[in-house]
Image: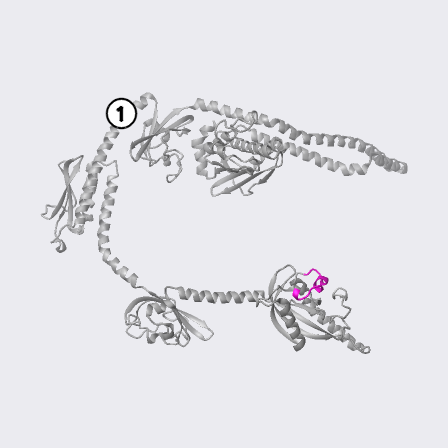
Amino acid sequence: MSRQSHHHSTGRSSPLEPGGSQAGGAPPLGALNALRESEIHFRTLFESSRDAMLVLGSNGRFSAGNPAARKMFDCKSLEEFASLTPVQLSPERQPDGRPSALAAREWIDRAKKTGACTFEWRHRSTSGTEFDASVQLVRMELDGETQLYATVRDISATKAVQMALRANEQKLRTITESALDAIIMVDSEGRINHWNSAAQTMFGYSADEVLGKDPHAFLAFPARSEAAPRPLANLASSESGADVGRIMELTARRSDGSEIPVEMSVSAVRGDQGLGAVAIIRDVSDRKRLEAAFQQQTAELSQRVRELNCLEQAAEVFEKNDLTPADMIRRLVAFLPFGMRSSEHVAARIVFQGAEFCSEGYQESPVQLTVPLVVDGKRVGSVEVSYMACPAHAADEPFTSRERTLLDQIAARLARAIERRQSYQQVTTLSRELEVILEATGTRLLLVDDTCAVQYADPATQRCYGLLANQKCHRYLCLSSERCTDCPNEYNQESSQPTVSFQRLPAETDRIFQRTIVPIRVEQNRRLFAELLVDVTELKAMETNLNQARKLEAVGQLAAGIAHEINTPTQFIGDNTRFLRDGVRDLEQVMMCVDRLIEAAGNHEQVDSLLQETRKTLDEIDAEYLRAEIPVSLEQTLDGISQIATIVRAMKEFSHPGTKEVQWIDLNRAVANTLTVSRNEWKHVAEVVTEFAPDLPLVPCFPADLNQAVLNILMNAAHAIEAKDAGNGTITVRTRSHRGWVEIQISDTGTGIPENIRSRVFDHFFTTKQVGKGTGQGLTIAHAVVVEKHGGTLDFQTEVGVGTTFLVRLPLQEAAARTLHDTQTAQGD
């Protein structure tokens, strides 16, 4: 290593250079070789050391530094390092507050005076990073000059570990002192060495009274066993004694002699002094009191359970509308005795309209309890329970007040059930009459209550829906196991206005019906929904034709742009083809020369003149140019053909007529096709950035309608950017799959939507554009396609002057796809 590359220009030798301390005459050759080997060995250690090694000259600057030093202080070269002083590689002050310049001077003077010293120092690299280091300074004399050799080691990690250890120790002390449980630690000799404040509160002894003592000398556990238990002792020889690792329930004695129930867990702890123990003790007095109170309530609760079971079974009977009053009473009387306190001694009897219904083993008894059965304000019978054999505990009070209340509740509920059953029979009669009227007029009618239960359906509607009365509507419409919070059938809406939708019925899939749902309030807190069905098949067919016309109109608007996109590659395909035609003509001349050469060679004639002619022809047609350009021309031509094919394919897929069936499509490809066919509409005003999810699953949808919706949103974004940036905007299109939904996000950097019109962006014929620029139908159609036809959502976020993001969410589940097919296809026809 040259002197110039390792030393600041001081004019003196370095301790790392041979001859740095040579004096007198030339040494023997052997000594010189040994010196060189020693210098090489020292240099190798110097250069490869992981610690920073450096030399501080008498001028206060570094004259040498190994690679580790340059790396530690972020110096790019030795020259940069040699220009620095210790103060420049230190913060203004050290952690003890002393100025670094003063402290550095003191340590340097001490090393020069004593010959060596070691200390800790806060350094700062040239990049400004501060770190702690251990520094060793060694004095050495070189060419009559006193220099210092320094070894610097980064101890930041060690400092961090020490700080973390101190923090953990403080955290442990804080936890033990703030714990609500008593924590006691004993050493290997069974003496207490830790006693937290909770232990002092629990047992009444201060830490000064117990530290260093045997805990069993003043803490008694009399409930443990007759022998004096010592759960904190005998751990020195084993870490898995009988009391280790389990929770013990004990009775402990406090300093005032009172006893408290406790739970204690003991763990063995091995430390520097041997095996000790940690005990965590919890006062469970409150819990024991609660357990006693709980046991007192158990008997009352068991009786209450019997009563509730009886009421529950009665409720199940009363809810069955297919039972006659006699069937309900017959089932009720069978389990009524089991609600009584002494069910094995009790039998029951119910009298209704002169008929008697008795449980098994019933007989007349003087010990009985009877309540009247009143229906519609008239007594029609009674409910009675009797003791067949009165037990001793029932001699003074055969029936408790709770049993009387239970019998009153049973009689009242039975009366209401009979009234409801009679009302149901009346409704059934009226329903038959209504069915005759509906069938005669050809009207379809469905009544649903606000719990989504079908209350009435005429025979024609039952056949079409495939349902029975009292079925939940989601069983045949939503394909869901529970009621939706946003019920698509409008049965949970608070609006009092009728709602209209369109649907195909299961039994008439070739017809389309208009569903009009009219809310009817029958009671203060109860509503019914009347659903009327009207055949609108022909009307929907006309609407389908209109939608197709709208789509063709959009295709027509895009035609000029498509023609322009196709014209560009067509032009350079034509240019390349003409170039290839001319090149082939030139190559034909070369082929003629080659043919004459082959013929002459076959006749063993002289070919020199023919070779010259061939070379001349090659030069004339510039064969090297043709050889280089023909492959390029062919590649450009193929690329142009590929561009045209891509545009044509995208246009074909985009403008393909819509189907009546849901299709599973590659959504990324569909969106890319829409971007392709609309490129001429946005390329002059915005740059399009696509972020398509590569793992996007196939999506169930109506492709043509979805393409139209995406196109409308893209056109809206392009117009917004044109109105703001005049060609400097960005449209970002993202796709992703998220929790059973697939999302299309279209963001623009346009003008944004003013707050006062945000609620109207999806309204029919609403537009803020100039005449001829928009019809106000683009976003309306997009909303109808996404929300009404696909069961998805279309939302937007906007900020005036920043831009707008539209989020299209489509359901992915197969069940949702079936719902689209079954209930929304009508809108696509």
What residue is drawn where x is 23% and y is 35%? 420
Q: Most extreme residue toward the top, as rendered?
A: 441
| Residue 82 within the segment the image draws in magenta | yes
Residue 429: x and y in percent read 24, 28
Callout 1: 10 Å neighbours few (<14), some, many (20+)? few
Quarter occupied by residue 730: top right
Question: What's the amino acid at mark 1?
Answer: Glu
Above or below, comparing residue 358 to residue 102 in the picture: above
Residue placed most toward the observer, 523 or 361: 523
Report the span colored magenta.
Answer: 75-87
Q: Is residue 307 above or below residue 797?
A: below
- The total of numbered circles placed on residues is 1
Q: Is residue 390 left or right of residue 130?
A: left
In the foreground, 3 or 29: 3
Say whether residue 710 is left or right of residue 607.
left
**Is residue 351 placed above or below 762 in the rendered structure?**
below
Instruction: Quadrant for the N terminus, please.
Output: bottom right
Quarter of the image for residue 159 reads bottom right
In the image, residue 728 lies at what x, y percent?
Answer: 62, 36
Q: Is residue 107 magenta?
A: no
Q: In the drawing, does residue 569 fall left or right of residue 238? A: right
Location of residue 493 in the rendering, given as x and y in whole percent from the top left corner: 37, 34
When asked about the image quadrant of residue 823, the answer is top left
Residue that label 1 marks: 433
